[in-house]
Image (tube, helix red, strand yellow):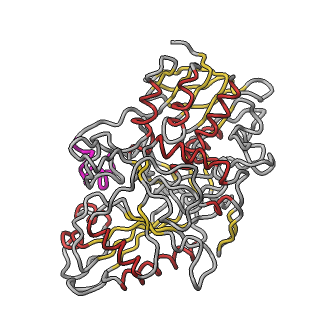
Amino acid sequence: MSTHYDVIIIGSGAGGGTLAWKLAPTGKRILLLERGDYLPREPDNWRPRAVHVEEKYHTTEQWTDKDGTRFRPGTGYWVGGNTKVYGAALVRLRPRDFGEVVHHGGVAPAWPIGYDELEPYYTQAEHLYEVHGTRGEDPTDGPASAPYRFPAVSHEPRLQQLHDDLTRLGHHPFHLPVGVRLDESNPRTSACIRCATCDSYPCLLRAKSDAEVLCVEPALAHPNVTLLTNAYVERLETDGPGRRVTAVQVSRAGGAERYSADLVVVACGAVNSAALLLRSATERHPHGLANASGVVGRHYMAHTNSMFLAISRDENPSQFTKTFGLNDFYFGDRDWEYPMGSIQSLFKMDPETLAAGAPRLVPGMTLELMARHSLDLWVMSEDLPDPQNRVTLDADGGIRLSYTPNNLEGHRRLVKRLKGLLRQIGCEDHLLPLSLHIAKQLPVAGVGHQNGTIRFGRDPRSSALDVFCKSHELDNLYVVDASFFPSCGATNPSLTIMANALRVGDHLVERMG
């Protein structure tokens, strides 16, 4: 096998996999390095105990938090990255998110590019990842250059009732844009069967719009693209002046390997990408590569996320539930001028998952009864880029993720507002012995929305990357995962990662000629 390529891409998820797809038709020699393997297709893909209790598809490695306590992060290393187990909610940032936004807890800084610059790539990413949706339902949506190629996924009856009840109250629920390979007009031949094991589960039917199925595999159909699995990148080497990455050091199958490329693209996820640059420190770059500004590893964000269970008077027999969204309080409320966030439907809870989460049970209520009557929702608010929320390396080279939640008042109010709405539509008493709302905020191990550790910008003094996500300091080093985010809004980051990878891909195609 040759050791020199035109492009090396490290990581095969939403950023790296999408970029590999974009560059594959150029004929340039591309090496895609993935530290994990292919996620196995097996019955456990659909078993709640395996997915939620045993966390079978998460890494077993240990990180430490700001206090030195070890924890197992909720992330996995697979071909396709975390898109193998994501909920496939593929939502754009709002146009206002690209400007400076004042929150109750501080300020979300402006991006160095605007919504208009990313919009064509949002459309391309929506088409590539087969997103189903309807334009115009969500009043916070930005303009789009084309409609969705696939119609919105219909609500099952209980979620349609929720949608109708909130509409009756004057709100604007919408069909959540989701990436699934579903043909509701022809269910017999549809890849997706609308099962209850999509959000947070691997798809046994390969019907989820993940980076492996839609990007990596099509890229590998080109003879110029090579994928190496179980290839852990130890560090990046640089030339004497420290202006170029000259080699990628890889640990694979118990041995050391070394590869080089004209261009090197890092897409390991915001935590691991920052850790790789920090591990690659040299005499010229004593604090890590691309880190003259000191921002590498800093400004970690992951959203403030809560899993919200509402027990309804009506049973909820829904299977495929990832169809509902509400953004009416995204930028505030009638008595609150600051942003609050978004509300989405979540996977349908089952008794085993409820038992693992160990919520306080209502007396006389069984887990089976709770699961039958639950409306399962996801409440997401923006956290702000605090430089003390950061990725560093411990003395043994392990990852330390220091994080203190911030900007919490908007999230608290959003949860309270949601409770009030649900009380108005019968999610409180009647058939059940007690009213019950459970809101459980995700701990530091919940890194599914990780972003912000290698921010891009126009000023090298306050950013690590330029507007095309190239290191200010190294001419051939790029980063295309969510590390580049200077702020994160209150939407799922995946579509923005994908769109930006396509945008950077256009830049690289032009650069390579």
Quarter in which the C terminus is drawn? top right
- The spot of residue 388 in percent (x, y) is 66, 59
Q: Is residue 72 magenta?
A: no
Residue for point 70% across, 37% down = 470
Please determine whether, in this image, residue 286 is positioned above or below residue 115: above
In this view of the protein, which residue sits in the foreground, 93 or 470?
A: 93
Q: Which residues are magenta?
A: 43-56
Residue positioned 52% across, 79% down in the render: 413
Tell me: 152 left or right of 373.
Answer: right
Query: In this image, 454 relative to 86: left or right?
Result: right
Q: Nearer the viewer, residue 462 or 91?
A: 91
Q: Where's residue 464, x and y in %? A: 72, 44
Residue at 75% from the left image edge and 38% from the top image edge: 286
Residue 325 vs residue 74, the one in the foreground = 325
User: Most prominent secondary structure in the magenta stretch?
Assistant: helix
Residue 386 image-quadrant placement: bottom right
Q: Nearer the viewer, residue 278 or 416?
A: 416
Q: Is residue 111 above or below residue 28?
A: below
In percent of width and height, residue 234 lies at 56, 31
Q: Position of residue 12 (x, y in %)?
A: 49, 35
Q: Is residue 184 above or below residue 174?
A: above
Q: Count every numbered label the image shows and give the total.
A: 0
Is 51 a magenta residue?
yes
